[in-house]
Image: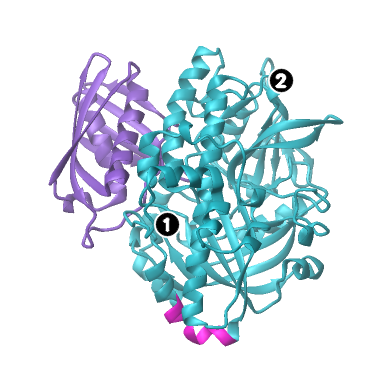
Chain colours: A purple, B cyan
Amino acid sequence: MSSSYFEHDADIGIIGRGLTVEQSFEAAAHAVFAIITHIEEVHPLTIVAVEFEESDPELALVVWLNLLLGKARELGMVFSHFYIQRQGNYWHGKAAGEKWREELERGVEVKGATLTMLAVKPIGPIWESRCVVDV
Amino acid sequence: MNIQSLLQLHPYLWTLPKTTGEKRAEVLLYGSEPLLASMDDKVLEQIANVAALPGLAGAAMTMPDAHWGYGFPIGGVAAFDAAQGGIISAGGVGFDISCGIRCLRSNLNLHDAVARFERLADRLFATIPAGVGEEGHIHLNPQQLDQVLLGGAQWAVKQGYGNTADLDYVEENGCVGGAVPSNVSELAKKRQRGEMGTLGSGNHYLEVQVVEHIYDQTAALAFGLHEGQLVISIHCGSRGLGHQIGTDYLVMLAKAAGRLGIHLPDRELACAPVKSPEGQQYLGAMNAAINCALANRQILTHLTRETFAEVYPNATLETLFDISHNTCKEEQHEVDGKTRWLHVHRKGATRAFAPGHPRLPARYRDVGQPVIIGGSMGTGSYILAGASTNQAFASCSHGAGRAMSRNQALKQWNGRTLIDDLKRQGILIRTRSMRGAAEEAPGAYKDVDQVAEVTEQAGLARRVAFLRPKVCIKG
C-alpha cells in the first residue's frame, strides 16, 4: 500500500494504491489524514466504525473519505489507521486514532473529498484510487 | 491557459469560440492577457462545462482571479433560470458554503496602535479558535443549532454577540430566508457542535490591516475609511456544517442528475433543477449553511471586539460590510433586455451591487456595495465598490487567486522561515500550523495589485482602498 499526491491549483489531489480496491481506499484515507497532521504520531487508541451502501466504487471512495472526515470532526479526533471491506454494495470500515492533543502537529483542515479527478481503477496488478480534496 | 484559443472582445474581456457541434452557452472570461495566460487550462475546461448545464442565463463567466477548482472554477459565475429548467449545483457553491469576509473599521490609527501589536497578536491568537482540531467556546444543543440555521447573524446578535447596527451591513441583514434545518443531516449538525465561533484553516484568516492608500475619496468617505486607519478582516465560512452539507448533497445530486437525464461533463458539477425536489432540498440546506456562516462571522466579530477592548480600551469596531463568495443567491437581473429571477452561483466570486441598488444600505447606496478582494498575508487586500459598468451579474473577483499548488508551495517555503521574514517586514503572524503557513506563502498567490487593477479596468468594480497587513491570525 502507498499514498501520494498530485497537483491541483487550489486544493490537493490524493492517491491511494494497493493490491485490492479496499487497500487503495485505506491508502487514500492515509493520504487525506497525513494532510491534517503528522500521522505517524497519532496513536490508534480508539476505533470508530463506519458503514455505507454504494454500488459505484468511485462514489464509494468519496463517501468513505467524507465519512471519515465527518466522524473525525464530530468526535474531535484524528485517525491514523484504516480498514475497509466490501461485501457486494456494502462497505464496512474502521478507523483508529485519538483525540487531538497539544503535541500533535497541526496541518491543514480537509473540508471534504470531491468528485473532481475522481478515479478508482486497476493499473496492472495495482488498484489506484484518486480524487481532489478541498482544503 | 492557451489564450490562442480565445477571442478578445474588449481589452479585459475574452470569449471561447464554440467548436463545430459544441452544445453550450457562451463563455466569458474577464482578465488581462497576463492574468489569463497564467491560469491553468483547466479553468477553461471547467467553465465550458458549466456553460453546458441546463437553464443557463446569458454566459458562464470567470473573474480575473480565476483558478482551477473542483467542478466550477474558483472565480466562476453562472446564473440559472428556474423557469427555464435551470439547475442548482452543489459543486457550483463548494464545500465551504458562504465562505466570505467580514470587514470592520476601527477608530484606531497605525501610529497610535503599533506599539501594542505584539500583545494584540497574542491576545487575538488566544481568543480566536483557529486551525485544524481547534474547538470553539460555544457548544449548542440541537434546538439551539436549528435556531442558528434559521436566524444567522440575527440569532447571534440576539445572544449578545455584537449589536443590531452590525446587521445593516451584513448581506441580507444577516439572515437569508428559505433555510430548512431539517434538510441538514445529523452528521452535519454534530460536526458543527464545537465549531461555532471558529476561524478554520487553509486560507482563512483574521487580519489587522492599515489603510495604506485611498483611490476613491468619495467612496472611502461613505465607507468611513481614511489613510492610516486600522481595519480588521475576518475570512471564514460555515465550518463543519457547511462542509458536511456539501459532502452530503454532492453525491445525492450527482445521482439525481443521472436519474433526471442531465449530462454532467464533470461529476463534481452535481446538480438538479431548482424546481425539482432534490434541488429544493439542497436549497433549504444551503440557505441554512449560509445562516451558519453569517452567525459564525458575527460571533468572531464579537470576540475580536472583546480582544481589542482589552488591548486598546477606547477602541470601537464597526462593521463595514460582510459579504460571502461561495453562494447561490436568487436575484433579479436583466438578460437580453428582460428582467428575470435567476439563481446566481458565485464560487470564489463576490457580489458587487452597483450604486443605487435597492438592496444596499442607505449609507452605501450612492457609491455602490463594498467589495473585498482578500490578498495573501504578506501583500495586501483591496476594498472596492460595485460599479454600474458591471455586466457579470453584479459579480467580481474575491481574492488574489493561487498561482501555484499547495504541494509546490510546500516545496518552496518553510513556514517558520516565512513567518520570521514577514516579522522583519512588520507583519506579525500567529498560527499553529507551519505547514499551513508555507502553503499560504505570499509567493504562492497571484499579484493582488494586478487582480484589483484588472477588476477595475474590466468595469467589474472600482478600487477604493488598499490595505496592508500588520497582524495575521492564520487558521
Q: Secondary structure at mark 2?
A: helix
Judging by the rendered image, the residue that carries numbered circle 2 is B84
Residue at 52% over, 53% down = B295
B113 in the magenta segment: yes
Can see residue B264?
no
Front-lying residue, A72 or A32? A72
Residue B390 visible to an observer of this rendering? yes
Q: Quadrant of residue B369?
A: bottom right
Residue at x 70% of width, y 35% of height: B6
Residue appearing at x 57%, y 60% in the figure: B375
* Residue stretch in magenta: B112-120
What is the quadrant of the N terminus of chain B in the image? top right
Give the residue type that dot 2 points to.
Answer: Gln
Residue B272 image-quadrant placement: top right
Front residue of B207/B215: it is B207
* Rendering coords of residue B362 (x, y %): 79, 58
Q: Which residue is mark 1?
A: B198
- In the displayed structure image, the side of residue B458 where residue B61 appears, left or right: left
Using the numbered discs, state the Cα–Cα distance from disc 2 to disc 1 in whole angstroms.
40 Å
Q: Position of residue B292 (x, y in %)?
A: 50, 47
What secondary structure is the stretch in magenta mostly built from? Answer: helix
Q: Tell me if residue B206 comes above or below residue B181 in the rendering.
A: below
The mark lying in front, picked from 2 and 1, is 1
* Residue B10 belongs to the span the image colors magenta: no
The chain letter for the residue carrying disc 1 is B
Residue type, label 1 = Thr
Parent chain of label 2: B
